[in-house]
Image (cartoon, rainbow, N blue to C red):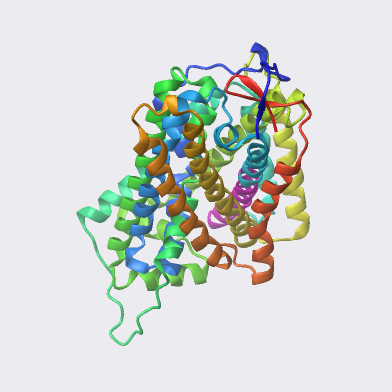
Amino acid sequence: MKETSSPLTLPGEGPSARLSGNLGVTEIIFMVVAAAAPLTVISGNVPLAIAQGNGAQAWTGFVAAAIVLLLFSVGFVTMAPYMKDAGAFFSYIRAGLGGRVGRGSAFLALLTYTAIQLGVYGFFGWAVDDTVRQWGGPHLPWWGYAGGALALVAFLGYRHIDLSSRLLGTALVLEIGVVLVMNAAILIHPSPVMPPPSATPPVTGPFAVALLFAITGFIGFEATAIFRDEARDPERTIPRATYGAVIIIGVFYAFSCWCIIMAWGPDAVTGVAQRYLADGGNMVLETAGRYAGNVVKQIMAVLLLTSLFACVLSFHNIIARYQLVLGREGVLPSFLARTHDHHESPHAASVVQTLTALVLMVLAALSGADPLVTVYGSMAGISTVGIVLLMILTSCAVVAFFRAHPALVKGRKFKTALLPMLTTFLMALVLFVILENFTTITGLSLVISTCLGALPFVALGLGMCRDMSVEGILEDGVAVRS
């Protein structure tokens, strides 16, 4: 049973530990959609969903993922006005399920975003090397390009968030624009490929696999709540940005996936996707060249690199802000809660995050692992399990929070109880589907995939077992002993 006491000021809880900014709905959506890396998902996840999932119906996986996340977002934004910290999932779970589970979710979130960031660094290094070689340049190790990106991310992450949001917004507009140009060219003059009459129809996979890759494409959407300290009017900005981000991402993914299917034809697209994956080619770049010309194809190749860079920059910002909040709450060392006097950024957490990414990148390089298949594939698998587990815990936290504070329900039982419980059930099904098909994500053996899939649960358990460095944690304005 929880024991309450008098209000407690935690390490880093003073004004200097708070971030500031003037981010509106549009800027926050830019940050979130950029973290989802739309061009990366279109060129990577969509071909995988078609080839290994339900073929010409793969677009339905993105629609289903968007619907589930919209349902989740209802409880998420209903509870948002009562969350005064920028810890997102951590703050929600702590407030609803208590300090111990909250600490576990914080460690889980750090693992989730650190894993996907490392994976994207591997993808970035591979993609730059592939582009350079296609243009006649030399072959260089992936970690050299990834290290250069890390240095630039470190510089931008150290400075004020407005600078990062402007860069991310520009990159986002360009990469969405080039995909829409391809989509328009397909709609204007579709030229499907007819499979040979004697060809054996390719074997399609289950809808579950398409849903799996679709869910992966939404990682990072919780960032709407992480940036609440820097939002212009968080009580209105956060809900609008959350709904807007999920709808924009979902519609863009589903529509683009459908266009690519129409570009090759429903009867042939599965075989085409499987052939490109087997040959190591990029199906989407070839689709762009076929319909919109070589210039658009080359532009898309460059924007794929900016998309990947925007992705790692967004995850850097998210991880740094998680560390800032955990430092403020006493879960991690309090120096992480420091903010820069001039840039008003979480500079201490940003430096620590950069060093962590550097160490992991060095270990990945020394292991000799393939940067795309092994590094990106396995890290994406870990992060997918982690993000779904976090959403399950958050939905449970919404129900528990409003049950403990009935005065806040105010006739909103559907939003505060029924819908979150439905979302918990649906997300549990999604988690089961992901774990059942985990080897498809990682591309590794069953034993290794099982160990990697268990890491999020281990992080959750370790966080729950960790002793607090202070007597309690702040919940609803009072210290609550765990």
Specify the quadrant that holds the C terminus: top right
* Residue 286 image offset from top left, x and y in percent: 40, 60
* Residue 424 image offset from top left, x and y in percent: 46, 49
| Rendered residue at 43%/43% (across/down) | 420
Query: Closer to the camera, 301 or 72?
Result: 72
| Rendered residue at 41%/34% (across/down) | 242
* Residue 264 image offset from top left, x and y in percent: 31, 66
* Residue 340 image offset from top left, x and y in percent: 68, 17
- Residue that protrudes farthest toward the front in the picture: 1
Q: Compared with residue 52, is residue 168 higher up or lower down, i.e. above or below?
A: above
Answer with left or right where residue 204 lies relative to residue 452: left
- Residue 389 in view of the camera: yes
The magenta stretch is 113-137
| Rendered residue at 52%/57% (across/down) | 431
- Residue 173 in view of the camera: no
Query: Closer to the camera, 77 or 125?
Result: 77
